[in-house]
Image: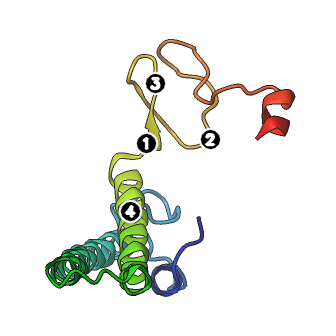
Amino acid sequence: MRLPDRLRRTTSQTTSQPAAPSSNGGSPPGLNSAYGEEFIVDLERRREQLVARVAELQWDLGGLVYEMTVRNSIDVEVIVKRAVPLQDADAELSEVERILRTEQTGTAGVCNSCGSPHSSGATFCWQCGKPLLAQVSGDEILKR
């Protein structure tokens, strides 16, 4: 999924600043640095804005559908046009929450078999050893 422009600007503004010297011998700053914390605060602020926006759009869309139903004149095209901004805001909210969860926990997901957390790029579960990705045969892919 492509990162929205607003988030990309926030990321580039945050990461394009010169690295502050750290106490661990001059290595690049991590999440505990001021820059990493600033990035997370910006994402948390954006999440709050998106939560409010999604709630407002859901409220408006529900009211629109209710009014159409009461008047017995449902126009699906109008509903779809009003649902598009809600879908966009909801998708951006999901992406922001995913990024925040990854930044805060350092994990990319959990194993479907045992529930142990795993990092991004992991192929097998460190706890039970089972594959994290479902193996699909070439024939199944062609059928889809």
Sequence-wise first label, 4 or 3:
4
Q: Earlier in the sequence, mark 3 or mark 1?
A: 1
Horizontally, residue 70 falls left or right of residue 27, namely left
At a point 74% along the width and 27% down the height, the residue shown is 136
Distance between mark 3 and mark 1 Cα atoms? 14 Å
Counting residues from the N terminus, which is met first, the one under dot 2 or under dot 3?
Answer: 3
Amino acid type, mark 1? Thr
Judging from the image, what secondary structure is the residue with disc 4 in? helix
Indicate the colouring scheme: rainbow
Tell me: residue 116, above or below residue 64: above
Marks 2 & 3, CB-CB < 8 Å contact = no
Residue, disc 3? 112
* Residue 140 appears left or right of 9: right
Q: Secondary structure at mark 2?
A: loop
Q: Image height check: is 139 above or below 2?
A: above
The amino acid on which the numbered mark 3 sits, given as a three-letter code, is Asn
Select label 1 or label 4 by which is in front: 4
Mark 1: few/some/many CA within 10 Å (<14, 14-19, 20+): some
Label 4: how many residues lie within 10 Å, few (<14), some (14-19) or many (20+)? some
Q: Which mark is residue 121?
A: 2
Q: Quadrant of residue 3?
A: bottom right
- Between 2 and 55, the residue placed more toward the observer is 55
Residue bearing mark 4 = 94
Give coordinates of residue 129: x percent, y percent.
57, 14
Q: Is residue 107 above or below residue 130?
A: below
Quadrant where the N terminus is found in the figure: bottom right
Q: Which residue is mark 1?
A: 107
Kindly identify the amino acid type of the residue bearing the numbered disc 4: Ser
Mark 4–mark 2 distance (CA, rounded to whole Å): 20 Å
